[in-house]
Structures are given as structure tokens and as C-alpha cells.
Amino acid sequence: MEKTKYIIIGNSAGGIGAAEAIREVDGAGTITIISDEAYPAYSRPLISEYLAGRYTLEKMLYRPAGFYEQNGIRTLLGEKVTKLDAAGHTLTLESGGTVTWEKLLLATGGTPIVPRMDGVDLQGVFTFNKLDDAMAIDEFLDRSKRRVRAVVIGGGLIGASVTEALVKRDVAVTIVEMKDRVLNTILDEEASALEAEALAGIGVTIITGHTAEEINGYASGEVRGVSLDNGRLLPCEMVILAIGVQPRLDAVHDSGIEINRGIVVDRSMAASVPDIYACGDVAEAYDFVYGENRLTPIWPNAYNEGRVAGRNMAGVPTEYEGGTAMNAVKYFGVNILSAGMVTPPGDGYDTVTRRYNGIYKNVIIKDGLIVGMVFAGDIEKAGIVYNLMKDGVDVNSFKDVLVADDFSLASLPEDIWRTKLALLTSEVASGIRAIEEPEEAVFDE
Ligand SMILES: Cc1cc2nc3c(=O)[nH]c(=O)nc-3n(C[C@H](O)[C@H](O)[C@H](O)COP(=O)(O)OP(=O)(O)OC[C@H]3O[C@@H](n4cnc5c(N)ncnc54)[C@H](O)[C@@H]3O)c2cc1C
């Protein structure tokens, strides 16, 4: 049986954040990162760029070659953890071995939800969550002799990402969305409508208010089409299941670790069992907008939570200041940034809204504090609004300027902009830029 001081399951945003934070304070303790993906850490959000043909794996790697070696990090890649014995500090690998730890981090991320319906095992049905998925779709398209028709089931972030890539690959795409509009969890009605218009503009068909009931196949095992709940058949050769992602808990079940929707952690990212921590998409970490722990599955949160976990694992008490669901993406030519609540959840909320030249900005305020924002078309200064939200600044006296077309730091009362100037160079601001321009940034703090 092998023994390692620190074991990290997951070689992605959370795992890398933790390993780096550990090394900053403990240069000697052995670190092992285990992942069932076979690649060095790559940017998951860029799998759509890979599929679109704009990125190679090499360009998606966000740490230099030699990163693991230089930091004394041992990797077990392509290796799955099948079982955890929390009390015995031992985990079991699919290949048969066991490893023991002093401190363990679960940075196992999310796994796509596969609906229970006939046909999900047919050839031509894919999920879109990892590089291997993008590679499999790529190969399928390369093998196809004529123009492929795809049905994307689910019009959320993953559905939008894969649609964008498929359109670039000249695939005819139909999105089937159960709710009444696309991107409904991250956008309000108006911003959704702008995205729907942009999608229609690039030839994507959107069917809302309906669900897929069955994927139909030929005797050969290939996809023939998708049947909807209204009896309509959408003929297609390819189906992408994009109805959502859930925390990946397969190694954790029966371990005694407390799980709600994700792994329950405190502000030090410690799980309910001693010496075990969790971060990223698998963990319910503190959300400063809601003032409670929730799933906030985005890249910068995973990385920051990983850093906090790593420091605590290495014995340096550190508290996670909190994150929130913040998405800054460019789909179909429309820049969007949304964060916190995207629609007021009840009475007692104030909104400031502005529309001009195809641009839409909406900020939601409660008791003077920003609790949510949706910017579409122009997100250049959205980072300032996000920072005001994060810092809990009372904006009541100047709320209208937040959505003005010429809004800038100088629009804020002087005492506030002087402090914000420093914050704008903070990691939150760079996190926002990072997602917009992943090729440059991403993943430096
Ligand atoms: C298509 C797509 C687009 C996205 N776009 C954005 C975006 O624009 N902006 C943004 O902020 N976020 C985006 N995200 C979300 C972002 O990628 C995640 O929030 C982030 O990757 C979470 O990091 P993580 O370290 O928690 O987990 P993950 O990145 O999910 O990594 C977890 C790793 O652990 C491995 N693992 C899990 N269980 C085991 C086990 N039992 N044994 C061995 N290995 C295991 C997994 O295989 C995986 O490699 C996107 C995600 C997808 C899929």
C-alpha cells in the first residue's frame, strides 16, 4: 500500500488550485493527483473550441510542460478511484491498488445527467463534458459522408457551447429546450431573446416548451431521429445530451461523507469527515449573493476554492470568502455576463434596466445591495458592477449609472472608485476577463 501526504482526486481547476496552494506553503510533502482523464490539466470550457477546430489539446493546456515535475507532483492519469475508506484514510483504484493519505481533496467535478429514455446508447449519441466527448464527436463528424443533422437536447450553457461548435462544423442543429427559452438559468427573458435571435440568425432551429421522449434508431444501431412529447419526429444523425451536469459522487457514496446536492463543506472547504476536503463543481461552497452554501459550478470558483482547500490541507488556516455563479461568455456573437440572481425571486427587489442599440443591461438590487446582473451585447464595464456586488457596496444613491452606456469607474462616488481601482486588478476582475478570452488568461489567478 502506497502512502502520500496529500491526495487530490481531479486534475482540473480545483485540483490544480489546491496543488499550487499546497506547494506555496509546503515544499516537501508528497502530492499525488489522480484523474481518470488521461491528459495534463486542460481548460474544460475550451472543448467547444477544440470541436470547432480552433484549438488543439496543446493550446488548451494551461500549465507549462514540466509543471508536475517541477512542483514534485506525482500523477496517476487515466486511473479511476472506485472507493473511499474515509476512516481508514485509504482509497481503491480501478486498476486494483490502494493508496493512503494524510489529507484528501475531492475535486471530482461534475458529470452529465443522462436522461432515462430509450435510445441513449445508440451510435451518434454523445454528452459534452470532457475532451474525450469532443474528440468522439469530432471523429463522428469526420466519418460522416454528408451534412450531419444534430438534435441538442437542452438549451443551457453546455447546449449553447456545443451548438456553437457544431455550427462552425457545418452541422444543421436543432435545440430542444423543455422550458420556454434558451439559457434560462443564466439569463433573464430579454437576454435570452437576444441569444435566441442570434441563434436563429446562424440557422439554428429552437424548439422550446417540449421534451425529447425517445431517441429512435435503425437496426444498425445508428441514430434515426428524436421523438418529442408532442409526437413530432426530428430526423437526425446525431444527438447531444445537454440537459445538465450534476456533482460527480461515484467515489464518495457510502463513505460517510455528508452530501446534500453536492459535498457539504465549511468555509475552509473541509468536508464532514476529518482530513477530507472538497472543492469545485462537486462541492457546495459559500455563495455570497445568497448568503448560504450552494453549487456554483464555474471555473474561477473551482480554482479559488481549490486554493483555499490546499492551504488548509497544508495547515495554514484560510477561509473561503465566497463566490457566486458568474458566467461571462460569448455565444453566437453576443457577449453576455450574468451573475448572482438573474431574475428577482420575489417582492422587495429593485431593478435598473437599460436597452440601447441592441444592448441590454439589468441590475437587481435588494436593500441597496446588488444581488444579480445580466449584461448582453456590451459587457466591458460589467466587471465593475460585479465587484460592487461582491463587496456588498450600497449602490442606492447612484444605482442608475450602473447601466448607463458611458458607465465607468469615474461614474461612481469618489470614495468608492478610489477603493475599486485597486480591486479592478484583483483576481475577480481577471477571472472575468479570463473566461472572455480564455486563450490568454485563463487560469492565472
Ligand atoms: C462545455 C463546457 C463549457 C464550460 N464553460 C465554462 C465557462 O465559460 N466559464 C466557466 O467558468 N466555467 C465553464 N464551465 C465549467 C467549468 O469547466 C467547471 O466549473 C470546472 O472545470 C470545474 O472544475 P473542477 O476542478 O471542479 O472539476 P472538473 O473540471 O469537472 O474536473 C474533475 C476531474 O476529476 C476527475 N474525476 C472525477 N471523479 C473521479 C474518480 N472517481 N476517479 C478519478 N478521477 C475522477 C474527472 O474525470 C475530471 O477530470 C464549462 C464546462 C463545460 C463542460
Image: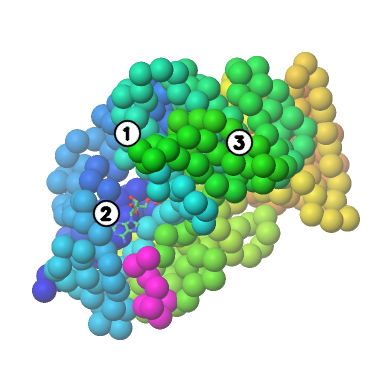
Residue 97 placement: quadrant: bottom left
- Please, what is the three-letter code of the amino acid marked with disc 1? Met
The answer to whether residue 222 shows anywhere in this view is yes
| Front position in the image: 326 or 190 | 190
Relative side of 414 to 111, left or right: right
Q: Is residue 429 above or below residue 325?
A: above
Total marks shown come to 3
| Residue matched to label 1 | 135
Relative side of 172 to 9, left or right: right
Q: Give how far apart the Cα atoms at labels 3 and 1 are.
A: 28 Å
Residue 177 placement: quadrant: top right
| Quadrant placement of the N terminus | bottom left
Badge 2 vs badge 3, beta-carbon distance below 8 Å: no
Magenta segment boundaries in residue numbering = 250-257
Q: Give how far apart the Cα atoms at labels 2 and 1 are.
A: 18 Å
The answer to whether residue 421 shows anywhere in this view is no
| Residue matched to label 2 | 35
| Residue matched to label 3 | 233
**Magenta span includes 254:** yes
| Percent position of residue 346, x then y | 84, 56
Q: Secondary structure at mark 1?
A: helix
**Label 3 vs 1, first from the N-terminus:** 1
**Magenta span includes 262:** no
| Front position in the image: 424 or 286 | 286
Q: Give how far apart the Cα atoms at labels 2 and 3 are.
A: 39 Å
Ligand 1 closer than 8 Å to label 2 CB: yes
**Label 2 vs 3, first from the N-terminus:** 2
